[in-house]
Image (cartoon, coloured by chain):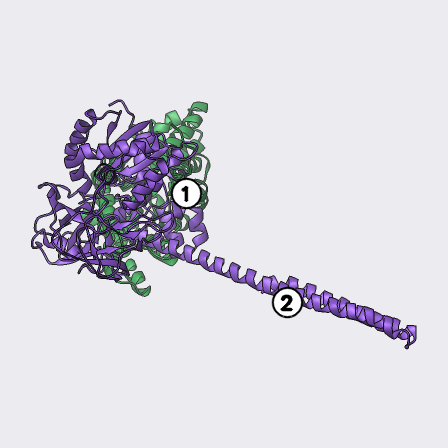
Amino acid sequence: MLSSPYISEKTSVSIIMLKVMLALVPAIAAYVWYFGPAILISLTIASVTALGLETIAVKLRGLPAKPFLMDGSALVTAWLLALSIPSIAPWWLIVVGTFFAIVVAKHLYGGLGNNLFNPAMVGYAVLIISFPVQMTHWAAPYSLAGEHLGLLDAFNYIVSGVLPDGWKLDAISTATPLDTIRTQLQLHRTVTEISQMPIFGSIGGQGSEIIALLFLAGGVYLWLTRIITWHIPVAFLGALTLISGLFYLYNPGQYASPWFHLATGGAMLGAFFIATDPVSGATTPKGKLIFGAGIGALTYLIRALGGYPDGVAFAVLLMNITVPLIDAYTQPPVYGHKGNKK
Amino acid sequence: MSRQIYSFHGGVHPEENKQISTQHPIAIAPVPSRIIVPVHQHIGQPAKPCVAVGDQVLKGQIIAEAEGYISVAAHAPTSGVVTAIAPHPVPHPSGLSDICIHITPDGQDLWTERKPIDYRNLNASALRNRLRDMGIAGLGGAVFPTFIKLNPGVPQKVQTLLLNGGECEPWITCDDMTMREHAAEILQGAAIMRFMLRAESVLVGIEDNKPQAIAAMQQAATQCDFPIEIITIPTLYPGGGAKQMIKTVTGQEVPSGGRSTDVGVATFNIGTALAIHRAVNHGEPLISRVVTVTGNVGQAQNFEALIGTPINELVALTGNSVDPVTGYLMGGPMMGIELAQIIDVPMVKATNCILVKSAKLFPPPPPAMPCIRCTRCADACPADLQPQELFWFARSKDFDRAQKYRLFDCIECGCCSYVCPSHIPLVQYYRYAKSEISAKQKDQEAADHARERHETRIARIEREKQERADKLAQKAASKPAAESATDDPAAAAKKAAIQAAIERAKAAKAESDVTAAPTE
């Protein structure tokens, strides 16, 4: 070292990324429990693709591959993307999404630390816009389907699109609760009626509400280990609760409850793992609150009034655009520049 | 204690490593084989040598006088012969040399006459001059001439005298040990400072990882004839920084670019208080201090060592080091400086710690990775800066924006570098940006100066030209009067018109030259 300090905390980007992945594990386990092991296949495909593309991209940029592969950022992106799309999505969908995340959103913008947009959400957005049909085939929860694809069958289906003899796609796939509420509302049914449907579970969907709870637990772990601060998740979930609560109070027949919105779709994953991406998010404490609240509000508006069942990805990307402005206008006062108060 | 403790933003908890150097009491280091006293050990003007080579000097004798306002004197740390007044490497990361007075000790350690100062009956200004001549400078690290800070100012600006016993840097224990062993003397020094500043309250801030020092100071405080408050503050680096300490004990922030007196506080290191006590009550100038020698050494310990002692002789007192030595730091691991060499580099008034490095204690940091804007640096910054933004601006040489984001409020405490998971040497970037900005400002000043000189020169040339033209015109005006008698008036009028036109053209040109000059 050229000058002080001569010591540093035993931490690294790799350790941070590993902790993020560790925080995802309980929810992934629950995912397997409720929706079958297909998610493990898609996580693997996404991981392998991400690491491969990362290696190529880093090498093309003339950088040493090892430290950049070891930093774990590509794996985190891959996992977040795989968790955002249907677990039984075809392999090429995962590859295309990962390509846009790693190559376009990350490395074309200058690699780790330089991307303006959340890579996983760029990948997701490309897929939902380009391949809406494949993106709506979600695995049905075990409690509804009665059976799920085994590991090998899931692998076969994801890679070749062939289901085992006698299996039908309809039997193993289903619309998500958010999707259901959207289509059923258009059929002039009330939220109260719709929420009697089995897919809804107790709050936010069969199985998925438990997974959301475990994402929440993972997020609390990240907060306790100081990987993330509380600002973005609290502002995100707070804004989502507030605005969905207002709509719900206005017309409970037309708008789902705030609890439903918190427990369903990408709310918890988004609040703790996606919106908190440090690279593409706001950095000042006040900025993080604005950034998080913006995502929460936009998520709700897209869900309730927009053209897509879930809104987290677009909300994150839209708020990514505003980050430089937010940061510039929320600089906290520096020591010695505040008015003295006793 | 009922006093409210405030907290400053950020801060870190590096491993303390303090216990290894507090196992033994402070030892008196023996008189070294040679003494090298730099004339410049404080902030401000170097002192001016007032002895000659070959002179016999006594311990405590003044050997270099203060020169200019911000300066203090230097003294012979022991008796002996002045062998050289010449440049010698001083503690500086670059191994820079500076004028030093070299003394070969005679082994007698004979004191010069010591006269205690009757400070209560001395005029304030004379008292400050005595302290200047006693060589008292701040021992906390900044080495600011103490007498200047002991001026209460008109109107009186200082209500609170704050003694800083924070000592938040890891490894260093000299203040801790000094407080344990010299608590009463420190408070006698505080009494003098309180008298000089006419301060209303006296506070001592000590981090809670020094329970024995706190107990000793509290015990000593009960013997004091004036109220004094020993405040236990949480251990959090850089809580011992003057600005952070002031915030912790008063809740006030020193304004940017201002001094602690702006919030009515004068802050001194406890070692400085001890030095003042010795100077005033015993007539002993500042010729020694307590220094921690620790890290990769045989037995880490604190020494009362003479200023000018070669650091290698000091390190040798601790026995053989445990592992291969990889370097030497003066100061702590967070803000200390790496000594380019230690062979006979002398310890100075600022030397609070010699930290011997090994690969085990100070492994080289992993290669830097890109910044991921995780803002741990911002969370740790005690100046409430956004280090990740400053890093970006420094790297892209966007110095204007770096200044707008308050680069110069960075105290270089190193918290940001310490917590950075990408191992980016952030503080180095800020030092670089600061020096670039300063260099640019100097260049700008030099350019302004040159332009002013150029403009003055052009103006002078024009003035001379004008004067010549005026003279010529005068001559011409007196001539036609004589000539008109012989030539016809029409020719004379024509001539005058031509002359006037020439003058006009000249004036116009001169004007355009003057306006053109600044654009050069």
Please indicate, yes or no, whether residue B469 appears anywhere in the rendered image. Answer: yes
**Image quadrant in which you'd find residue B384:** top left
User: Label 2 crowding class (10 Å Cα cut-off): few <14, some 14-19, many 20+?
Assistant: few
Which lettered chain is shown in purple? Answer: B
Circles 2 and 1 on the same subunit: yes
Q: In this view, does B460 lie above or below A15?
A: below
- Quadrant of image for the N terminus of chain B: top left
Which lettered chain is shown in green? Answer: A
Residue type highlighted by circle 1? Gly
Secondary structure beneath dot 1 equals loop
- The residue carrying mark 2 is B461
Name the residue at 11% across, 47% down: B300
Residue type highlighted by circle 2? Ile
B260 vs B367, left or right, is right
Where's residue B192, x and y in %?
Answer: 28, 33
First reached walking from the N terminus: tag 2 or tag 1: 1
User: Given contact means CB atoms under 8 Å apart, are the residues at marks 2 and 1 in contact?
Assistant: no
B460 vs A201, left or right, is right
| C-alpha distance separating marks 2 and 1 | 43 Å
Name the residue at 73% across, 65% down: B507
Where's residue B229, x and y in %?
Answer: 25, 27
- For mark 2, name the chain: B
- The residue carrying mark 1 is B257
